[in-house]
Amino acid sequence: MITTHPFDDDKLREECGVFGVAGAVDAAAMVALGLHALQHRGQEAAGISSFDGRHFHNHKALGHVAGNFDSEDTMRQLKGDWAIGHVRYATTGETALRNVQPLYAELSSGGFAIAHNGNISNAMKLRHDLVRTGSIFQSTSDTETIIHLVATSRYRTLLDKFIDALKQVEGAYSLICLTDSGMIACRDPLGIRPLVMGRIGDAVIFASETVALDIVGAEFERSVEPGELIVVSGGEIRSHRPFAEKQSRPCIFEHVYFSRPDSIVDGSSVYSVRKAIGAQLAMENPVEADLVVPVPDSGTPAAIGYAQQSGLPFELGIIRSHYVGRTFIQPGDGVRHLGVKLKHNANKPLIAGKRLVLIDDSIVRGTTSLKIVQMMRDAGAAEVHMRIASPPTMHSCFYGVDTPERSKLLAAQKSIEEMRQFIQADSLSFLSIDGLYRALGEASRNDDRPRYCDACFTGDYPTTLTDLAERDQPNQLTLLAERVAG
Ligand SMILES: O=P(O)(O)OC[C@H]1O[C@H](OP(=O)(O)OP(=O)(O)O)[C@H](O)[C@@H]1O
Ligand SMILES: NC(=O)CC[C@H](N)C(=O)O
Ligand code: SF4
Ligand SMILES: [Mg+2]
C-alpha cells in the first residue's frame, strides 16, 4: 500500500482541490465539473457530499473525477442544492478509501462534511491528545482531527465550536464544510493555500482556483481572505475574522507550478506571472543559443517570457503526450522514470544541430531534467543549457504540497555545479529568490516581512511545526505516527 505520511522519507505529497456550491439546482453536478477543472491538484481520489435539506449523500472513490462521477446513477444519488467536493493527493494518511474526502460525521448539531486543502502540522499531537481522551478516529487523515475538535468543543453553537477547533490547529488549511444549516468556507490565518469565492445566479461557489469557477460559468467575486471564515446560510453571507490579524503568507509555489496558468491566484494571473518569471530568468541568466524550448507543461509560460525577453526564437522542441498525468506526483521512483519517458518526446527535426535553452519551472528530484537533457542530446542537440524558473527547491513542504524529504531533493544534496553534472547539461542556473519576488511585483524579498510562504526555497517556515519537532524523539507521539502511517 502506498503511504504518504509526512514521516515517510521517500513518499509523495502534493496538493488537493476543494469546491463547494451553496444553493443551486443539481449542485453535485456542478461540483463534479468544478473538480474536473481542479484535477491537476489531486489525482489519487475524489469525493462529493451533498445535502438535500433532510439528508446528506456521499460518494467517494480512488482515482479521477472522470470515471467516478460521470454515471447518471452516481450523480442521481447526490441529491440537493448544496454540495462540496474534493480531489486528493495525500499528505497525512495513506491513499485508501477511508481517507478520501469530504470526510463526513454526525455531530450533536447534525451532519458535517469537510473538504480540506492543506496540511495540519500538529495533527499527530492533536490526535494523540484526542485519542487519550476517548476520540475514536475512523481515518488516518490529518483533516479528521478538525472533526473531533469540533465534536468535543465546549462551545455552544456549531460556528463557535468550529472556530474553537481551528484555533487549536497549526499549519495550512483552506476548508469548505457542509452542515445542516449551510456552508462554511475558510482559509488559515496566513492564507497559505488558495481559496476563491464566485457567484452564479443566487448560488455561491467556493473553489481552490478560479478555473473551477470558469467551468461552471460562475463569476469570480473575490479571494477568501487569509484568516477569513465565510458562512452561507438562510439566504445570507456572513464574513467572520476570528483570528488575530497577521501578515499573510500565501504559497509562492502556486505561482511557479501548482495552479493552472488560466487561474487568478491572490489577484494575479498565473500565466502573466510565469511569463514575468521567465523574463526575469532571461535577465539574470542569459545564454547564447539558437532556440528556447519549454519543458511542457508547466515550463511553457516561463519559456515564452524567456524567449520574449532574450529575443531568441521559441520552439516546441519537446512534445508532451496528453494521456499521462503529472510525473511530480506519481508514487515511486521507478514509475517516475517511466512516466517521464511516456510523457515527453523530442521533436527531432527541430532539435538536430541546435544550441538549446531548456526552461523548466523547478527541479525536485532531477528525474525530469536528467531524462530531458539526455533526450535532447539523443535528438542531436549541439548544446543543452538548462534554466530553472524558480530558486533551488531545498526544503520539504509541510503545508499540503508534495515535496519529498530533503534526502530526495536534488538541490538539498548537491551544489549547482554538482546538479549540472548530474543532469548532464552544458550549463544550469536558477532564478534568484529576489527575481521571483520581482516577477510578483515586489522590489525584492523583504526578509523581515516576506509576502509569501517560500519555505521550500528558503527554509523560512511561517508556522511552528510541532509534529516535525517531535518526530525524532522516541516518545508516544512517534509511536502513534508510525501506527497511523500504516
Ligand atoms: O525534478 P523532478 O522530480 O523530475 O520534478 C520536477 C518536474 O516535475 C514537475 O513537472 P510534472 O511532470 O509534474 O508536471 P507538468 O507536466 O505539469 O510540468 C515540474 O514542472 C518539473 O518538470
Ligand atoms: N494535499 C492536500 O491538501 C491533502 C489534504 C489532507 N491533508 C489529506 O491528506 O487528505
Ligand atoms: S513550503 Fe513551498 S510549497 Fe509549501 S506552502 Fe510554502 S512555498 Fe508553498
Ligand atoms: Mg514539469
Image (cartoon, rainbow, N blue to C red):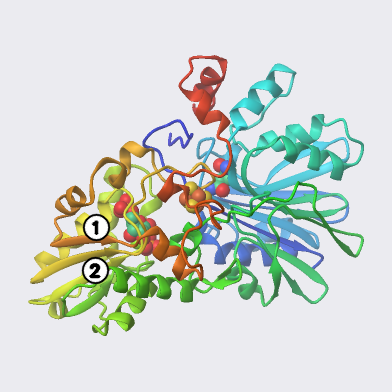
- Give the residue at x 68% y 67%: 30
> What's under tag 1, amino acid-wise?
Ser
SS at mark 2? strand
Disc 1 crowd rating (10 Å Cα; few below 14, some 14-19, many 20+) is many
Mark 1 residue CB less than 8 A from any atom of ligand 1: yes
Q: Position of residue 304 (x, y in %)?
A: 35, 78
Q: Closest to the observer: 378 or 52?
A: 378
Q: What amino acid type is highlighted by mark number 2? A: Leu
Residue at image position (52%, 24%) is 470
Verify CB contact (< 8 Å) between mark 1 and mark 2: yes
Q: Nearer the viewer, residue 39 or 371?
A: 371
Q: Quadrant of the N terminus?
A: top left
Residue that numbered label 1 is attached to = 369
Q: Earlier in the sequence, mark 1 or mark 2?
A: 2
> What separation in Å lies between label 1 and label 2 (alpha carbons)?
9 Å
Q: Residue at x 31, y 40 (%)?
A: 408
Q: Quadrant of residue 333?
A: top left
Q: Residue 206, image x and y in percent?
A: 70, 62
The percent position of residue 14, horizontal first and vertical second, equals 48, 49
Would you say 443 lies left or right of 75 here? left
Q: Which mark is residue 417?
A: none
Q: To which quarter of the image does residue 112 belong?
A: top right
Residue 358: mark in rendering = 2
Q: Position of residue 111 (x, y in %)?
A: 82, 43
- Asked if residue 476 shows in the view, the reply is yes
Does residue 232 appear to the left or right of 393 in the view shown?
right
Q: Say if residue 62 shows up in the picture.
A: no
Secondary element type, mark 1: helix
Q: Residues within 10 Å of mark 2 (few under 14, many from 20)?
A: many
